[in-house]
Image (cartoon, grey):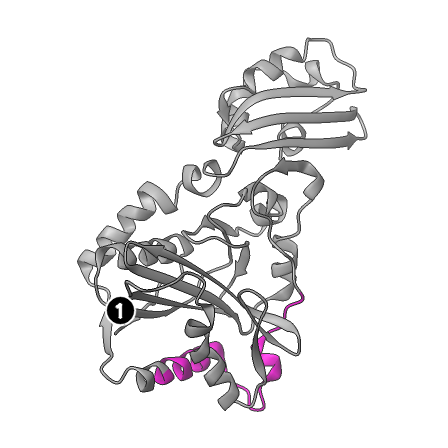
Amino acid sequence: MLIIKRHHTNPYFNLAAEEYFLKETEEDIFMLWRNEPSIIVGKHQNTLSEINLDYVKENNIRVVRRLTGGGAVFHDLGNLNFTFIQSNKDHTLNDFRKYTEPILDVLQQLGIDARFEGRNDLTIDGKKFSGNAEMVWKNRVLHHGTLLFSATMTDLSQALKVNEAKFQDKAVKSVRSRVTNISGHLQQPMNVLQFSELIEKHIVTMYPAALFYELTQKDEQIIKEMVLTKYGTWDWNFGNSPDYNFRKVMRTENSGTIEFCMDVQNGMIMQTRIFGDYFSHSDPKEIEAVLTDIPHQEIAIRNAVAPFEISSYFSKLTVDELVKGLF
């Protein structure tokens, strides 16, 4: 067992590192790591339908897709994440109890009655503090989980607060749960790094032959390349979403009611229809036409409509209002 020391808090790097160690190594691995404020969406989810896009943009919260299934989760520096990667030809998927047991052991030692409940959750007093997910690649399993220790609950609830009426798709939806921070249940105060050290020490007792490992320059270089080509890209984090239909009704003081309807496939807008009680001097079908065969992405939409005087098509509407209506 290698216990890999992770100091990066960039979520793109941390998610890329998981894939790197899963696919490019043979050793069993354990990692503890933290992310700067970010939303980590499940492999099969429609990213835009899981996040509060305005809040995410205003607060510079990064959005990253992971390799495993399950629902979207919020990370910040008060959230500790753990990863097991092990080789096991006989492994069966969803062996969540095996990999969460060390976490429960540590919490029991701290006098906290933490339990495994439902499909993949850890709870205290019926409130969730950990969600877990797994995947198998060849003969190796990757299991990772979140541990809410001292996360900012306001950010968590706002960042994942979405209007489900906007989207109709077949993507996997996140299940919102009542959540709690571990720190609120401690008999003696400690910070997230001290808690991390306790878990690390417990893993060493479970695997006495474990060795500590620091990322090499080669490791860093390969992982950063994976960020550039995959984990930091719009194609992976947004464009890789399942197909969906988007509908949003926007009411403006000066332009009246405008309804946007889009058919999106592989992240690309296939068709846009715009309805409403607005007034126009020019034919809005020209705007519908340029909002076709482009990514459902803000910069792509802004570039597409840049040559047009938007207020001529939708009376007194600004470009910023138009873009907001399309997300």
Give coordinates of residue 174: x percent, y percent. 60, 53
Q: Is residue 267 above or below residue 150?
A: above
Few, some or many C-alpha atoms within 10 Å of disc 1 (few <14, some 14-19, many ≥20)? some
Name the chief secondary structure element in magenta. helix
Q: Which residue lies at the image location 49% right of the left edge and 23% below the top edge?
A: 294
Magenta stretch: includes residue 194 = yes
Which residue lies most toward the top here? 282
Q: How many marks?
A: 1
Looking at this view, is 23 or 262 the one in front? 23
Give coordinates of residue 184: x percent, y percent. 62, 80
Q: Is residue 74 above or below residue 318?
A: below
Give coordinates of residue 270: x percent, y percent. 54, 22
Q: Is residue 106 above or below residue 123?
A: below
Q: For residue 93, which quarter of the picture?
A: bottom left
Label 1's element? loop
Residue tagged 1: 28
Query: The C terminus lies in which quarter of the figure?
Result: top right
Query: The N terminus lies in which quarter of the figure?
Result: bottom left
Q: Is residue 280 left or right of residue 35?
A: right
* Residue numbers of the magenta segment: 178-202
Q: Is residue 108 above or below residue 258?
A: below
Q: Is residue 127 left or right of residue 215?
A: right
Magenta stretch: includes residue 195 = yes
Residue kind at label 1, given as amino acid type: Asp
Q: Which residue lies at the image location 34% right of the left edge and 53% below the top edge?
A: 16
Give coordinates of residue 34: x percent, y percent. 43, 66
Q: For residue 272, which quarter of the picture?
A: top right
Q: For residue 17, which quarter of the picture?
A: bottom left
Q: Which residue lies at the image location 59% right of the left edge and 74% below the top edge?
A: 123
